[in-house]
Image: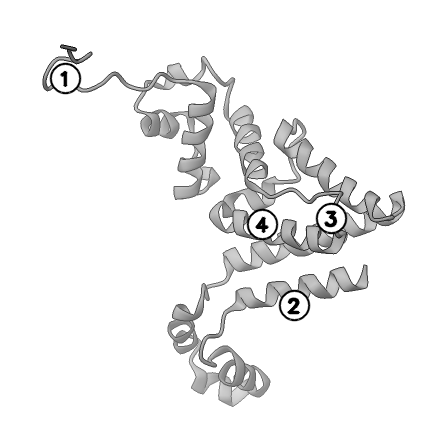
Amino acid sequence: MTTSHYSAGQPPARMPLSRERVLVGSMRVADAGGVESLTIRSLAQELGVKPMSVYHYVTGKDEIIDGIVDLVFGEMELPSAEGDWRSEMRRRCRSVRTVLRRHPWAIPLLQSRTKPGPATLRHLDAVIGCLRAAGFSLELTAHAYALIDSYVYGFALSEASLPINGPQTVGDVAESMMLEYLATDYPHLLEFTTGHVLAPGYDFGREFDYGLDLILDAL
């Protein structure tokens, strides 16, 4: 007969703290309230530990941000140098957009870190490798990478900032814009709003693939 490791009614021991747990907890805080809400105190509260315990695993907020930005990169699909570069880059870009919808706080931070982690470096290397394997010169690789990511990150930022977030919010937002007021002074905006934005099923997010394909076709 075996006996339980814990006596009746006694909760199991808390999961030991680790750097990974600190970073995952940090991401939860940032996802819930933005990166500005992430402090050692709020993180400790999320983890259920004392603030000083966190310092055993990270030196401070800068290291935490470096770490969670690397986690974001780790969620993105990598393009393969073995496949068709256009298909691989399209898949990668759609993945980046999906990840940034989960973590919108990360958008302005992706290119700001001076101590990139391993997932970040793998991502950069894979994108460059995909373009180089397709025959892009070093100069054209630089042009393509800058153009593609400017579009993807810019679209993600617009998508995160717009008051319209999917078809279900269009009606409320349009009503708040006072269409009668638009009719007086802004006829082109009124035509666009009533003829396109208020059409059944309108979703700003659908513009992403159109723009992405335009860029990839041009490259």
Task: Give me the residue at 37% from left, 73% from top.
Answer: 172
Are the two marked residues, 4 and 2, in contact with CB atoms closer than 8 angstroms? no
Q: Amino acid at mark 1?
A: Gln
Nearer to us in this view, 187 or 156: 156
Where residue 187 appears, as percent x and y from the top left, is 56, 88
Residue 210, disc: 2
Quadrant in the picture for residue 200: bottom left
Q: Secondary structure at mark 3?
A: loop
Q: Amino acid at mark 2?
A: Tyr
Mark 2 crowd level (few <14, some 14–19, many ≥20, 10 Å Cα): few
Is 47 on the left-hand or right-hand side of 148?
left
Quickly name the residue at label 1. 10
Q: Is residue 177 above or below residue 54?
A: below
Q: CA distance from mark 2 to mark 3?
A: 22 Å
Quickly name the residue at label 4. 95
Q: Name the N-terminal-most of marks 1 and 3.
A: 1
Q: Name the N-terminal-most of marks 4 and 2.
A: 4
Q: Secondary structure at mark 1?
A: loop
Q: CA distance from mark 1 to mark 4?
A: 43 Å
Quadrant in the picture for residue 81: top right
Are the two marked residues, 1 and 4, in contact with CB atoms closer than 8 angstroms? no
Where residue 32 appears, as percent x and y from the top left, is 39, 43
Closer to viewer: mark 1 or mark 3:
3
Q: Name the N-terminal-most of marks 2 and 1.
A: 1
